[in-house]
Amino acid sequence: MHADDRDAADEAAFRAWLSASPDHAGAFEAVDRMWSDVGGLTDLRTDFRRAPRSRSVASRRALLAGVGLLAVTGGSAMFWRLASAEVYETDVGEQKHVSLDDGSQLFLDAQTRISVSFTQTARTVDMEYGRANFRVVPDLKRPFIVEAAMRKIVATRCNFDVRCQDGQVQVVLIHGEADVKPAAAGGENQRLKAGERLVASNEVEKRDKPDLSHVLAWQTGYEMFDNEELAQAVEEMNRYSTAKLAVEPGVAGLKVSGMYRVGDNAAFARALSKLLPINVRQAGDTLMLTADSDP
């Protein structure tokens, strides 16, 4: 209702909507505060006032519809979660430490993107892709929730890794306990304890106790492979270097084991050439891994 050219019909419709539910008032107040406080909306308000009347009416109605949607879907709490989210991301070869306002510590692996939002009832991290370590400070009134690949990891005080890639989520508990459940209602809850790992995609779940020194090697600048296909190992190493590796189909299925420092694909290729029946040759900016018989 910030537009200068609002008419009596607009105001009457707004009052009717506002009195229909107590939630509507809270939702409108949230939008109104955003409208008033966020500097980036100043130009938008100016354009809104100067626009032709047909556009103003449509815009006002869209705003009211949006406010109504906020009320239906949870009101101002949901609005503020979306509006106040902090986004953190890393590029190829980049790792980043993040200190959150509550004291929790995050360590983001290369090619990771997350958004963090705190409300009075929850601390939520939406992981779009990548891998991160979480050291969670306890807060019994606000559980720490990581949402990744249709799973929710709910923790209070613990240290854990989460990886989200190609619709699959991997959770490794280092210290403490955490619950992992499907994001959709009605799914079965999994309580993970220190030393356990859960790998889940769609309805398939696998739970085991891996060697933590292997699965956590990424935090010290290494990748550990245990009988991994060469194509998968190369894909992993390419996340850390702009000098890319490529694998010809004939050798893609060869198995790779061992621990390798990330960020130096040339050294990785040289090591592979001594361990596997492959050649390494330069093809433009790419190092090609080919069979021994290739010229």
Image (cartoon, rainbow, N blue to C red):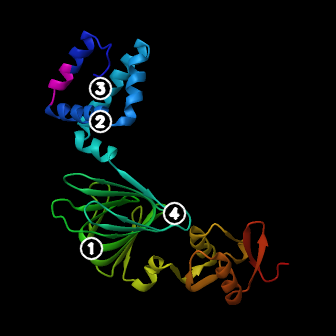
Q: Main secondary structure of the magenta part?
A: helix
Q: Where are the magenta residues, as a range?
A: 15-21
Which mark identifies residue 158?
Answer: 1
Mark positioned earlier in the residue sequence (2 or 4): 2
Left or right: 256, with 101 as reference point: right
Queried whether the magenta region covers residue 18, the answer comes back as: yes
Q: Residue at x 78, y 66 (%)?
A: 284
Front residue (pair 279, 187)? 279
Circle 3 residue? 64
- Tag 3, which secondary structure? helix
- Tag 1, which secondary structure? strand
Left or right: 235, with 112 as reference point: right
Image quadrant where one finds the N terminus: top left
Label 1 and label 3: CA atoms lie apart by 42 Å
Task: State yes or no: discs 1 and 4 in contact (Cβ < 8 Å).
Answer: no
Q: Residue at x 50, y 78 (%)?
A: 221
Label 3 and label 4: CA atoms lie apart by 38 Å
Image quadrant where one finds the C terminus: bottom right
Circle 4 residue? 111
Query: Residue 242, image x and y in percent?
Result: 63, 66
Query: Residue 287, image x and y in percent?
Result: 73, 72
Which mark identifies residue 96?
Answer: none
Mark positioned earlier in the residue sequence (3 or 4): 3
| Discs 1/2, front | 2
Circle 2 residue? 37
Q: Is residue 180 above or below residue 59?
A: below
The answer to which quarter of the image holds residue 148 is bottom left
Task: State yes or no: discs 1 and 2 in contact (Cβ < 8 Å).
Answer: no
